[in-house]
Image (cartoon, rainbow, N blue to C red):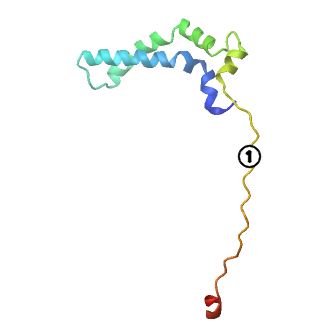
Amino acid sequence: MPPHLSHLLQPLNVGCFSPLKRAYSREVESLMRNYINHITKLEFLPAFKIAFNRAFTPANICSAFRGAGLVPLQPEAVLSKVDVQLRTPTPPAALPKAPWVAQTPSNARELEA
C-alpha cells in the first residue's frame, strides 16, 4: 500500500482525532468568551481533558474502526479508499548522441579552424 494512503486506514485518524480537534476548538472558543486569550498549561490541560473525553468515547472508537472498514473486516470498503493505479514504469529516454565532441584547442591554428 502506498505510504500516502495509509492514513485512510488508521481508525483513530478516521474517527477520533477529527472530533478531538473540533471539541478542543469549542473549548478554546469557550475560554475566549470568558476573556482568556492566552492559554497556558493551566488552561490547556482541563480544556484538553474535556475535549478528549468528548471525542474518545466507546461509540466514536467503534465507529472509527467501522469507518476504516477494519471491524468487521470489509476488504471492499478498505480497497475502495485506496486508488492505486498499477502501471509499468516508463524507462528513461536515451539521450541523443552529440554530433561533435567538445575539445579545448591546443594551439592557435586549432582555435581558428
Residue 92's place in the image compared with 9, above or below, is below
What residue sits right under mark 1 in the picture? 90
Q: Residue furthest left?
A: 35
- Whether residue 40 is visible here, answered yes or no, is yes
Q: Quadrant of the N terminus?
A: top right
Q: Quadrant of residue 82?
A: top right
Numbered marks: total? 1
Can you give x and y, in whole percent of width and height, for residue 47 in the image? 37, 16
Mark 1 surroundings within 10 Å by alpha-carbon count, few (fewer than 14), some (14 through 19), many (20 or more): few
User: Which quadrant of the view contains residue 69?
Assistant: top right
- Horizontal arrangement in the rendering, residue 55 relative to residue 33 (left or right): right
- Residue at the image point whose x is 25% and y is 21% from the top: 36
Which residue is farthest top?
Answer: 59
Above or below, 43 against 89 in this view is above
Q: Position of residue 85 (x, y in %)?
A: 70, 32
Q: Is residue 99 above or below residue 91?
A: below
**In the image, what residue occupies the spot 29% across and 17% down?**
31
Residue at point 71% right, 13% down? Answer: 74
Vertical placement of 113 versus 3: above or below?
below
Kind of element beneath mark 1: loop
Residue 25 place in picture, x, y as percent? 38, 19
Q: Is residue 48 visible?
A: no
**Amino acid at the residue labelled 1:** Thr
- Residue 28 x %, y %: 34, 19
Q: Nearer the viewer, residue 90 or 78?
A: 90
Q: In which quadrant will I find the C terminus?
A: bottom right
**Residue at x 67% of width, y 81% of height:** 103
